[in-house]
Image (cartoon, rainbow, N blue to C red):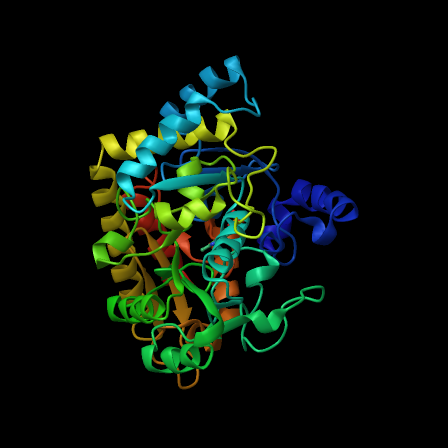
Amino acid sequence: MDYKKKTKTSAKMFAKSSKLHVNGVSHNIRFYEPYPFVVKSSTGKNLVDVDNNKYTDYWMGHWSLILGHGPKNVKESLKKQIEKSWMYGTVNEQTIKLSELISKAVPVAEKIRYVTSGTEATMYAVRLARSVTGRKVIAKIDGGWHGYTSDLLKSVNWPFTESESSGVINEEKIISIPYNDLEKSLKILKRHSKNLAGVIVEPVLGGGGCIPATKEYLKGIQEFAHKNKSLFILDEIVTGFRFRYGCLYPTMKLDPDIVTLGKIVGGGMSIGVMCGKKEIMEYADTTGKKKSERSYVGGGTFSANPASMTSGYATLKHLKSRKSIYLEINSLGEFARKELNKIFDGRVAITGKGSLFMTHFLKGDITEVTNSGQAAKCDSQLLQKYHFKMIAQDGIFFLPGKLGAISYAHTKKDIKKMVLASENF
Ligand SMILES: Cc1ncc(COP(=O)(O)O)c(C=O)c1O
């Protein structure tokens, strides 16, 4: 097989990695058969593996690298910061600078708390919702992924009914609702209304299949939550600063209580953000509140470290100063979806929005993909084969089975090359 011939050093290194690490990896989704190539460097749109194969990257650091790998301005800012230090463990100027940008671009971010991953941000959002409402139940979407927090580790993988993991307790406190089906979702929510602390939703399902929510759906869920005095939490960890300079929610005239951010706002360094309305976020204020009243949320050792704050700031500054970036990458995404639709000629659903896109090979009675259930019933083996073929033969990298993200480092020529590789497949 081409892949094994061209990735001999990766094979040896991955064997070593497997002895040292569970599954050989440090994030379950990073493994694929027969073994993942091992990366030695990355620049712009490219990853280079230890056998010197170059791949046009559409995984883009879990979709966090909107400006590509190692963009010049972010690199220069980081170099300067690292000369000064990369860890203070104290209040620092870099954090204040990033927060000033975020709070201007995301109106609901009246108060901000930094952590070091999206998982932590959503975990604290759940705790905060419970503290504010005095209730215990959290509703999430079937197929929604919010990181590995035990508070939301349910109904992630089809058929959404089995436990995702041993070791998770109190799963009955997590309920799940079908995406883009308002009637069914409200029915479920109503059954739990008395105990419902909050609903957490992504405006575009990321891990669940790159599926945009309809405005009516999100509005309907929000309306129910607010009438019910439950919190409406938007997880914009994938969507924040992905389609425009800011979040997606203002474009739908939504009014979330808490928003979580991550990925892009850290510019490729570790970050998680929980932000929201002042009166909600103030439950996390520890000054003058009794233990029984406050919501005790992190940070941690590395939260708001000056390196992450600097790369986030440099990234947002760049996005802010060149709004044409969004026009360009969104239109490349549009082009990719249009061309892929053309060549697969009715046999696929190409989902996505702006610079995010995903191919679903239709199977059985599935004719469209508007929720994770439909996505799961598509031909996932064929999708794996398709992505793997591009890795092995075309020097194009999608994490097998996952959505593709276009960065500012990609060009129309790259998209055309990817479309041609798809056509050959
Ligand atoms: C919507 C969403 N929320 C939360 C997370 C968790 O973020 P992290 O991997 O930084 O913990 C992810 C990760 O992909 C995500 O897509």
Task: Residue lying at the far right in this picture: please name it.
Answer: 19
Tell me residue 290's x, y (percent): 55, 46
Above or below: residue 324 compared with residue 393: above
Q: Quadrant of the C terminus?
A: bottom left
Q: Position of 361 compared to 213: left or right?
A: right
Q: Position of 223 compared to 154: left or right?
A: left
Dividing the picture into quadrants, the one containing residue 263 is top left
Tell me residue 33's x, y (percent): 63, 59
Task: Residue lying at the far top in this picture: please name it.
Answer: 83
Above or below: residue 21 compared with residue 141: above
> Which one is in front, 229 or 272?
229
Tell me residue 325's x, y (percent): 25, 39
Q: Quadrant of the N terminus?
A: bottom right
Above or below: residue 308 compared with residue 417: above
> Which one is in front, 26 or 147?
147
Tell me residue 414's x, y (percent): 34, 45
- Residue drawn at point x = 57 percent, y = 52 percent: 292
Q: Position of 276 compared to 107: left or right?
A: right
